[in-house]
Structures are given as structure tokens and as C-alpha cells.
Amino acid sequence: MFSFGVAGTIWTDAVPIVAAQLGGAPDDYVRLELALRALVHGTAMLLIAKTVHPEDVGEMREACRKSIETLLREARLSLSPSVLVESPIMADIGDTFKPGARVPQSGIYDVFHDPNHSQRHQVTCVYGETFPPCNRCGHQVHFKLAMKAIHLTNHDYFK
Ligand SMILES: [Zn+2]
């Protein structure tokens, strides 16, 4: 059963841990902490008050756990690209990367240059390689994941 002790531990310890993992100061995570607190407290109260049918307790706890994962993922996405590139988590559509970062996910990326020399265009990048600087605008260029695609040689059917 989801106890108050567990809930208390989650909301007092999660924010400094998340801040350490994602970068930034704990103060940057006040909204995240409030959301986690509301989520965990709400779940704990429903379970403690026994308003949830015993058969649904597992589902309730799982829903809470999934919601926490979603909140943490969204928090990661809202951070700056320089923080994102250090995350060990696979990339999502819209994640943005700077030259020098490792490609976290093979696929098609939108490329944004200094607009004085080039319009946006698309390239294919392969997992594990490094996003390069542009030979015109250098490190001003950045890469935004537009579509994921497993590289042929990494696909289970072609290994
Ligand atoms: Zn460029």
C-alpha cells in the first residue's frame, strides 16, 4: 500500500535528485515539485481514505508512477539544449542539439543555421555520431529531431 512515508520521501527527495540529474538549481523546479506533490499526495489520500476499490489499488499506483515519469520527462524537455544533450534518456521529437553533442537517436533532423547564410533544411543523423559545426556559421547551427528512424544496420531484422 502506498503509505504517507513513501509519499513524503518522494516529494522531499525527488526535486534535489532531479535537479542534480537534469542540471540547474532546485529553485528551477518549484513547479515540478508542486506537481509531484499534488500527484503523490492526491494518490496517497485516495488510497488511505479507501475510496479506491481494492482491485484497483495496483492500477492507481501504476497510474501515479507513470504520471511521475511523464512529469519528469516534460521537465527534461523544457530545459535548455545544453542540458538535454547530457541526458542519458533517448531523444524525443523536437529535442534540440548543439554541435559537439552525441546523436541520441537516428533519424531526420531539422537544421537551423545563422539565417544570413542558409534556410532551414533537413539531414539524416546516425545514433552515436557527433553533431558537427557548420563550416559557415560554426557553432550557431543546431539540430532538432523531426523524425525518428532506426539505422538499417541497427535494426533487428538486418543485424
Ligand atoms: Zn551554417
Image (cartoon, rainbow, N blue to C red):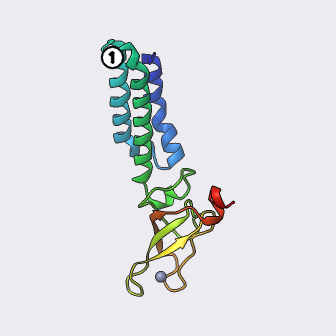
Residue located farthest toward the left when viewing the structure as drawn: 51
Give residue 86's position: percent from left, percent from top: 56, 55
In which image quadrant can residue 133 be found?
bottom right
What's the residue at 44%, 18% (across, down)? 2
Question: What SS does tag 1 mark?
Answer: loop
What's the residue at 32%, 30% (across, down)? 38
Give residue 73's position: percent from left, percent from top: 44, 46
Q: Disc 1 beta carbon < 8 A from ligand 1?
A: no
Compared across the picture, whether 127 is left or right of 39 comes to right
Give the crowd class for mark 1: few <14, some 14-19, many >=20 residues within 10 Å: some
Give residue 139's position: percent from left, percent from top: 51, 75
The C terminus lies in quadrant: bottom right
In which image quadrant can residue 117 be found?
bottom left
**Of 58 and 96, the residue lying toward us:** 58
What's the residue at 49%, 38% (across, down)? 16
Identity of the amino acid at label 1?
A: Val
What's the residue at 41%, 85% (across, down)? 118
Q: Is residue 132 above or below residue 34?
A: below
Give residue 47's position: percent from left, percent from top: 36, 16
Compared across the picture, whether 26 is left or right of 52 comes to right
**Of 119 and 16, the residue lying toward us:** 119
In which image quadrant can residue 60 be found?
top left
Compared across the picture, whether 53 is left or right of 139 comes to left
Q: Is residue 86 above or below residue 14?
A: below
Q: Is residue 117 above or below residue 63?
A: below
To which residue does mark 1 refer? Answer: 52
**Of 56 and 109, the residue lying toward us:** 56
Q: Is residue 36 above or below residue 130?
A: above
